[in-house]
Amino acid sequence: MGVLPDRLPFNHQVNNGSRPRFETLWGGALPVDPGLDTAGILQAAADGQIKALYIMGADPVTTFPDPDLARRAFDRVPFLIVQDLFMTESAKYANVFLPGCSYIEKDGSFTNIEGRLQAFSKAIEPRGQSRPDWQILAEMMVRLGKSVPYFSPRDIAREIARTETSSRELTAAGVA
């Protein structure tokens, strides 16, 4: 869905002709240049160039190929937020820990390795203070004074569908 530093949703490049379409779709400017990958982000944090990091559903201290770089980054970054299911090794460095839900505690979807969207339904209620990721992000947007475009997983699915339609139109027009 566009979580790579040089990609927009549906594998469109950040710095090609597809960016204006996504800017119109989302109502705002997007970066012209690709962002940093994980190694670049961690190195920038370790070098004191990043003031805050938000890690969601990842544990770089145990999964990144250079765990020492992750530790140095987390030691150096002034403000670290970790959103995860458990108190991971990375979460131990956090200034703020936000408890997310597992997939069985929420409705939602994921994009599989073939690029196909697959939906899933909540099987049990969330435990404790955990909340679905989209709700945590929506609450953060409210607290930052931003408008919240999502009030349910259905709203997110609608945006994905609109984005996919735009992506198909761009591909048909020869813009990748």
Image: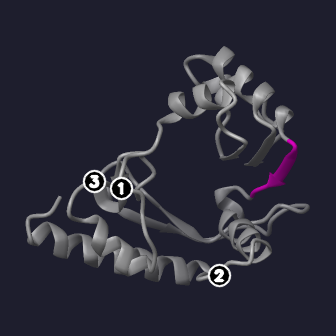
Quarter of the image that includes the N terminus: bottom left
Q: In terms of secondary structure, where does tag 2 sit? A: loop
Q: Relative to 87, is 171 above or below?
A: below
Taking depth in this image into account, of 85 and 162 the one nearest to the observer is 162
- 17 or 60: nearer the viewer: 17
Callout 3: helix, strand or loop? loop
The percent position of residue 105, horizontal first and vertical second, equals: 72, 64
Q: Quadrant of residue 162?
A: bottom left
Q: Residue at x 78, y 34 (%)?
A: 88
Q: Which residue is mark 3?
A: 15
Q: Residue furthest right?
A: 128
Residue mark closest to the camera, 2 vs 1: 1
Bin the neighbour count of mark 2 within 10 Å (Cα to Cα): few under 14, some 14-19, many 20 and up: few
Whether residue 99 is in magenta: the answer is yes
- Closer to the chain start, of discs 2 and 1, is 1
Where's the C terminus, which quadrant?
Answer: bottom left
Q: Image height check: is 42 above or below 129?
A: above
**At x 22% / y 57%, what residue is drawn?**
16
**Where is residue 80 drawn, in percent x and y?**
78, 42
Which span is picked out in magenta?
95-100
**Residue occupied by mark 1:** 32
Q: Which residue is mark 2?
A: 148
The answer for how far apart the CA atoms under marks 3 and 1 are is 6 Å
x 66%, y 38%: residue? 50
Kind of residue at badge 2: Val
Q: Of helix, strand and loop, which mostly describes the magenta segment?
A: strand
Tell me the element at label 1. loop
